[in-house]
Image (cartoon, grey):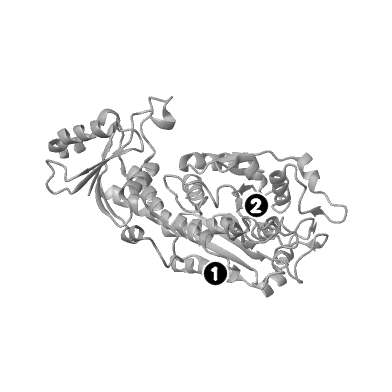
Amino acid sequence: MLIAFAGAKLALGGETRTILRDAEPQIARAAAAAKFTGKRGSALDLYAPAGLPSVGRLILVGVGAAGDGENADKSAERFDDYLGLGGQTAAKLGQGASALVLFDLPEAPADAAAAGQFALGATLRSYKFDLYRTKKKKDESERDGVSDIALAVAAPEAAQTSVAAALDLADGVIIARDLVNEPANVLYPEEFARRAAKLADLGVEVEILDVPALQALGFRALLGVGQGSAHASRVVVLRWNGGAKDAQPIAFVGKGVCFDTGGISIKPAASMEDMKGDMAGAAAVTGLMHALAARKAKANVIGVLGLVENMPSGEAQRPGDIVASLSGQTIEIINTDAEGRLVLADALWHVKDKYKPAFIIDLATLTGAILVALGQEHAGLFSNNDELAGRILEAGKATGEKLWRLPMGPAYDKLIESKFADMKNTGGRHAGSITAAQFLERFVDKTPWAHLDIAGTGMGSPASDTNQSWASGWGVRLLDRLVKDYYES
C-alpha cells in the first residue's frame, strides 16, 4: 500500500509528483468522480492504480491548502499539524496493514521533526484497549495487529532519530492510557506501585512507601483517605537523575485514587464506574517519567504518586473528622468525596520538604467544577508563579494539550477556613476548583508550584485524530515538552 498527500486542487509535493506521474490521469478522474479536492482530513482510495504496477492500493490523504481548516484566517501559515496528520493517516490505513508513506507535502517542509510528530500521531491513533474482550466481530479480528508504516523521507538518518524519540514519548502516553483504562479490581494501589517500579529497568530510582513507612513519616491525611479500603495505600517516589549531580531537581506529583466511591459521602451510582480513572494524574506522572528516562533527559526529575482507594466501610473516614497532615496543619473533613486534595497535601509537602525542588507541578482529576467551567477542551491551571504558569501554557500550545489559567487569591482562601481546625477540605459549591487549588497551595510554602486539574481531559475525553480511547494519557506530552524546552541542561 502506498500513501501520498495531496493539497488543494490535487497539488502534490515535487518528489510525489515524479513518483505518481504515470498514475496522474487516473487520479484526476477518480478525484473528479469522488469529489475529492484535497481537503484536510479527506482521502481518495484507488486500487491497482494504472501506471504503478507494484502498488496494489494507493491512498491520497488530503492536507488542504495553506490556511485551511483552523488556520483559515491565517493564509500565510504553512501546514504544521503533523501530529494530527499522522493520526488521520493511521485511521485511513487501519490496523494490521502495511504501507509506505511518501512523506512529501505540497507547500510544507517535511523535516525530521515533522517525521517524528507524524509517527507519534500515527502510533497514538492506533492505540486501543481491548485486553478483556474475549469475543470480537469478524471484521475486528481481521484488522488486528500492529500496522507497519515506513516513511520515505529526504533525510533518513535525521528522521530516524526523530521518530525513535517520538516512539519513546508514545510509549509514555500509552503507559498512562493503559493505567487509566484498567479496572479497579486489577489496578489497586499495590498493583499500581508494582507497575511503576518497572521504570527501574530504564534507570529510574524507585522507592515504595508502604503503610508502616507512611505512618512513621506522618502521612496522616493520605492514609485517612485509604483507611476504609481493603487495599493498602502506597506512595511511590520515582527519581531520574539525568542532570548535573548538584542540579536542583524538578518535581511532578500525581493524584492516584485508584477508585473513588466518594467514601462515606458516597457518590451517586450513575457513572461511578468512571471513577476507576481517578488516578489519571498519577498515571500521567508515571508515563512522563518513562518518557524522560527513555530519552535520557538531561534533568533531575522526581515523580511522586499518591496511591489510595476511597471506599466506605466501618473503618472509613467520616465527615466531621479532623486529621493532622504531614505538614502539621490540621484539616476538618467536610466531605469525604473531596479526597484527592488530602492525598496531594501530604505528597506535596513530602517532596517540598525532602527534595527542595525548583518547582512542583501536580496533576489531578480533582473537581467536577472544572468540567463545568472549561468542559473537556482545556485543563485548569492554577499557580503561585507567573513564569512557571507561562511556560506550561506555551508547552500546551506546542503540544495541543491546552490549559486555561484560573484566578487564586485571599478571598477564595477564606472559603476553606474552619471553625475547628486550620482548614476544611472543601469550601462548598461556589468556585470549587479554585478553593481546591487554594487548599493545595497551603502545602507548598513558597516553592514555585502549579496545579493542573485534569478532570475534564484525563478520562472520558472526546475522540480526536490521535486518541480513540476512553483514557487520553493527557499531560505526558505537555510536561515532556515543558522539560525539554526549559529545564534540560
Q: Which mark is residue 115?
A: none
User: Between residues 364 and 230, which one lies in front from this camera angle?
Assistant: 230
Identify the residue at image location x=70%, y=44%: 434
- Label 2 sits on a secondary structure element that is loop
Label 1 is placed on what type of residue? Val
Q: Could you tell me residue 154's position as x and y percent?
A: 23, 43
Name of the residue lying farthest toward the bottom? 212
Q: Could you tell me residue 130's position as x and y percent?
A: 44, 62
Q: Which residue matches tag 2?
A: 366
Identify the residue at image location x=65%, y=42%: 372
Is the residue marked by circle 1 packed among few (<14), some (14-19), or many (20+) residues within 10 Å?
Answer: few
Identify the residue at image location x=53%, y=71%: 194
Identify the residue at image location x=70%, y=51%: 440
Q: Could you tell whether 341 is left or right of 42 in the image? A: right
Q: Could you tell me residue 271's position as x and y percent?
A: 61, 55
Q: Which residue matches tag 1?
A: 186
User: Between residues 251 and 290, which one lies in front from this camera angle?
Assistant: 290
Residue 12 in view here: no
**Are the residues flagged by discs 2 and 1 in contact, CB closer than 8 Å?**
no
Label 2 is placed on what type of residue? Leu
- Label 1 sits on a secondary structure element that is loop
Task: Please tell me whether residue 344 is drawn above or below residue 28 in the rendered image.
Answer: below
Q: Could you tell me residue 127's position as x and y percent?
A: 41, 55
- Count of numbered badges drawn on the protein: 2
Residue 422, image quadrant: bottom right
Choose the circle earlier in sequence order: 2 or 1: 1
Is the residue marked by circle 2 packed among few (<14), some (14-19), or many (20+) residues within 10 Å?
Answer: many
Task: Please tell me whether residue 100 is drawn above or below residue 289 in the rendered image.
Answer: above
Q: CA distance from mark 2 to mark 1?
A: 22 Å
Task: Please tell me whether residue 7 is drawn above or below residue 269 in the rendered image.
Answer: above
Mark nearer the viewer, 2 or 1: 1
